Amino acid sequence: MKKICWISLFIISLISCSSISKIIPGQNETENSNLYYEYYNLANEFYSLQKYDKALDYYTKAMDNQELYWDSYYKIAIIHSYNQEYKKSIEMFTVLLHRDEKNISIKSSIAYMQAMDGNFEESIKIYKELITENPEDFADLENLICIYFQLKDYTNAQEYFNHLKTLYPDSKKIPDFEKELEKSKSSSESGTDKQ
């Protein structure tokens, strides 16, 4: 009788143990980490497909993982700029710039978004700093000239255009800038003829 009881208890304990999931130390952390990487990968896929709303959702979820936080944060800042939410994007890029004050790419992004948001004075200030800090990159100089054209400030546009032409004669924007400056000259001449 005792033998049967022990066998019964053994069988019951086997059944009850098999119904309990095996807990491996660190398993939950690994599964959660993998989940966040899956979120991040999904976000990247949606981002590449230009489905920014879905990418935004998944980058936000991935931010719960410290290893993915700043990469996700950066992508979210870019998505806000694509969605023309420039103020949000500027705020986020400013946080990123505080983390890496010498990052010229982030600074250039802020200058561009300031211009897109209509903050031309701030944009001009940043672009002038960038031109001084990073004279090898003529894209900032080209963007500054575009802002002066936007503001119809042809005097400064001409000054920086001369600078571009001297330092970067291979710039593909030179013909367009020349046409714009010619138009401005002819419109000012026709304006003076009317007076």
Image (tube, rainbow, N blue to C red):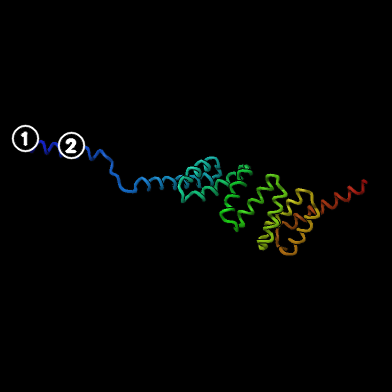
Question: Which x, y percent locates residue 137?
Answer: 66, 60
Residue at image mark 1: 1
Q: Give the vertical position of 77 relative to 136 (above or below).
A: above
Q: Amino acid at mark 2?
A: Ile
User: Looking at the image, which is closer to me, 136 or 98?
Assistant: 98
Residue 15 badge = none
Determine the residue located farthest toward the left in the rendered image: 1
Q: Earlier in the sequence, mark 2 or mark 1?
A: 1
Q: Secondary structure at mark 2?
A: helix
Q: Residue at x 69, y 61 (%)?
A: 132
Question: Which x, y percent locates residue 173?
Answer: 72, 56
Q: CA distance from mark 2 to mark 1?
A: 16 Å
Q: Residue at x 50, y 43 (%)?
A: 60
Q: Residue at x 54, y 45 (%)?
A: 49
On screen, residue 125 versus residue 24, left or right, reads right
Q: Give the vertical position of 17 relative to 165 (above or below).
A: above
Q: Residues within 10 Å of mark 2 (few under 14, many from 20)?
A: few
User: Looking at the image, which is closer to me, 159 or 102?
Assistant: 102
Determine the residue located farthest toward the front in the rendered image: 98
Q: Secondary structure at mark 1?
A: loop
Q: Amino acid at mark 1?
A: Met
Question: Which x, y percent locates residue 172?
Answer: 70, 58
Determine the residue located farthest toward the bottom in the rendered image: 167
Q: Residue at x 68, y 62 (%)?
A: 135
In the rendered image, which quarter contains the N terminus? Answer: top left
Residue at image mark 2: 12
Question: Which x, y percent locates residue 63?
Answer: 49, 46
User: Looking at the image, which is closer to me, 153 or 67?
Assistant: 67
